[in-house]
Image (spheres, grey):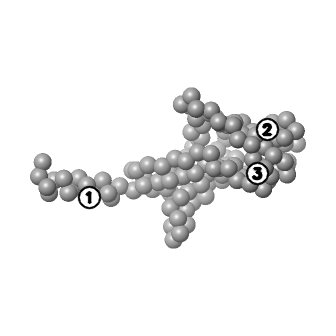
Amino acid sequence: MTTTAIACIMLAAACDPAYQVEYEIQNDSETTVTIRTDHFTGLMDTSIIANGTRLIFFNDSGLGRTTEKYLDQVEGLPFEISIVNSNGIVYKKDPLDISNWEKIYPDSEYSAIGRVRLTVRPEDFD
């Protein structure tokens, strides 16, 4: 392969758009919550977070599309999740329903990171 061909391949690869999206829980429930996630790879995780805190528990990044395009195309979650408060009460909304999550598009002036956020509130456990 010639040097020119290699340079063209490297240039084409460098021009691919990239995306980075963080999935997070914002706990505004006035109590601690336990979050269990299953990432479909056999990897399961449990986190306990205090009221007023945010947990980033999954980061998806790659090449081939922008963060904005990624967020536009999100129709479901790439993991299973369950949420229980410190009183043992299960989160009453469907945490797998993407309409319960907020898509936060990046402010391109400062960051290229997008977010998919679920905010947990006291009334979500009534």
Q: Secondary structure at mark 2?
A: strand
Q: Secondary structure at mark 3?
A: strand
On screen, residue 10 versus residue 27, left or right, reads left
Q: Amino acid at mark 1?
A: Leu
Q: Earlier in the sequence, mark 1 or mark 3?
A: 1
Q: Which of the 4 image quadrants contains residue 37?
A: top right
Residue 15 position, x and y percent, is 33, 58
Q: Which of the 4 image quadrants contains residue 91?
A: top right
Up the image or down, 72 lies above or below 33; here it is: below
Task: Give the residue at x 56% y 57%.
Answer: 114
* Mark-to-mark CA distance, 3 and 2: 11 Å
Residue position for label 2: 84
**Res 11 label:** 1
Residue 6 position, x and y percent, is 18, 53
Quarter that holds the C terminus: top right
Question: Is the residue under label 2 in contact with that under label 1 (CB below 8 Å)?
Answer: no
Q: Residues within 10 Å of mark 3 (few under 14, many from 20)?
A: many
Up the image or down, 63 lies above or below 97; here it is: below
Residue at the farthest top position = 42
Q: Earlier in the sequence, mark 1 or mark 2?
A: 1
Q: Residues within 10 Å of mark 2 (few under 14, many from 20)?
A: some
Q: Amino acid at mark 2?
A: Val
Task: Give the residue at x 88% y 39%.
Answer: 87
* Mark-to-mark CA distance, 1 and 2: 49 Å
Residue position for label 3: 27
Up the image or down, 115 lies above or below 125; here it is: below
